[in-house]
Amino acid sequence: MKLTRRNFSLTVAAGAMALMAGAAYAETTLTGVYYIPQSYRALSHGPNGFIEKLNENENISVEYYDSGRLVKADEQLPALRSGSIDFMFHTTSYINRSVPILSLVGLPGVAGELYANPGRIAKGSPLFDLVNEELAKDGLYMVSMMGNILEPEYLWSTKDAPIRSIEELKGKKISVVSYEATKMLEGYGAAAVRIPSSELYLALQRGTVDAAVVNPSTVIGRSLQPLLDIAYKLPVNGYGIALFVDLKRWNAMDEETRAAIESAADWLDETGAAYANEKIYSEEYWPTIIEAGTEIVEPTDEEIAEMEASAEEIINEWKSKFDGDLADRAIRLATGKED
């Protein structure tokens, strides 16, 4: 073919279109979900930063839906397993009935230890690897738990039904999510009620419940501080915000995509829980709660010991779900009794 200005221009244009098509084809689109709304700033800061870091990779396009906009909280895990989404952020306490190893971080006596010792469940730690070893049996991989769990869930009560000690749990109607915390509270004669956080304000206002087991994020995120007059800081339960992928899909991803996710997760591990615990809770949430007039009651060492002793049966029931000494070793690693 004779080269003319016209066919030269057409050839250049065709080549440019081919390059554009190749670039578009090479771009990987990842869909992620999270049911927590942005009003929960402490719980959203880490995931938001992870998405920003991941979006810095020019070969990855991220479609991210928080606040349950794509799938609701109960639908996230099935959506991940079916391949409808590529990754999800989830609270460990919400899915620990489906994935029992995640109950570890909320066990009485364990939650307080993890919270007080950042790094024990950080990426690459023996505990992190042990949890992933068990998650693999469920076809899951935990990329990060933000470096640590969040501040534990305490007992918050109203002035009409105050709780300032373990003895005052008897006869109280308490909103609680965790199975382990539910069993423990029932052992003290409390009536455990599972109420979505979106309905908790009205439940407290109407007296449907007397108290709630929540952490400061729920108090501030749902503006509960005017209704909650007493914060009894017994570490009843704890949870982490973890980033999960389906293990088969993770292994099938190209190396560049996995590396980009891991790199963003490194930032998440270093910053996520640390910023929430050390900055947002300490410098913003607790001052707001105290300013609202909430009475802060610190548990005695004897009360914490009593709580841990009363949870022994619950912990043994949890251990029975696993083979060998995996559960015992997980607790030893979480409580600093094994390196």
Image: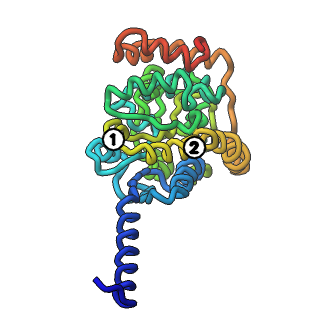
Dot 2 falls on a residue whose secondary structure is helix
Q: Position of residue 66 (x, y in %)?
A: 45, 56
User: What residue is rendered at 42% in x and 32% in y?
Assistant: 192
Q: Amino acid at mark 2?
A: Leu
Disc number at residue 334? Answer: none
Question: Which is more foreground, mark 1 or mark 2?
Answer: 1
User: What residue is rendered at 51% in x and 16% in y?
Assistant: 331
User: What residue is rendered at 61% in x and 16% in y?
Assistant: 336
Q: Nearer the viewer, residue 162 or 29?
A: 29
Q: Which residue is mark 1?
A: 252
Q: Amino acid at mark 1?
A: Ala
User: What residue is rendered at 51% in x and 37% in y?
Assistant: 144
Q: Nearer the viewer, residue 184 or 92?
A: 92
Q: Position of residue 289 (x, y in %)?
A: 67, 47
In the image, residue 311 above or below residue 259: above
Q: Give the quadrant of the C terminus.
A: top right
Callout 1–callout 2 Cβ contact below 8 Å: no
Q: Which residue is mark 2?
A: 268
In the image, residue 213 above or below residue 130: below
Characterize the local packing of mark 2: few (<14), some (14-19) or many (20 or more) Cα atoms within 10 angstroms. many
Farthest left residue in view: 82
Farthest front residue in view: 2
Q: Give the quadrant of the N terminus.
A: bottom left
Dot 1 falls on a residue whose secondary structure is helix
- Dividing the picture into quadrants, the one containing residue 142 is top left
In the image, residue 121 above or below residue 175: above
Asked if residue 87 shows in the view, the reply is yes
Q: Position of residue 240 (x, y in %)?
A: 52, 36
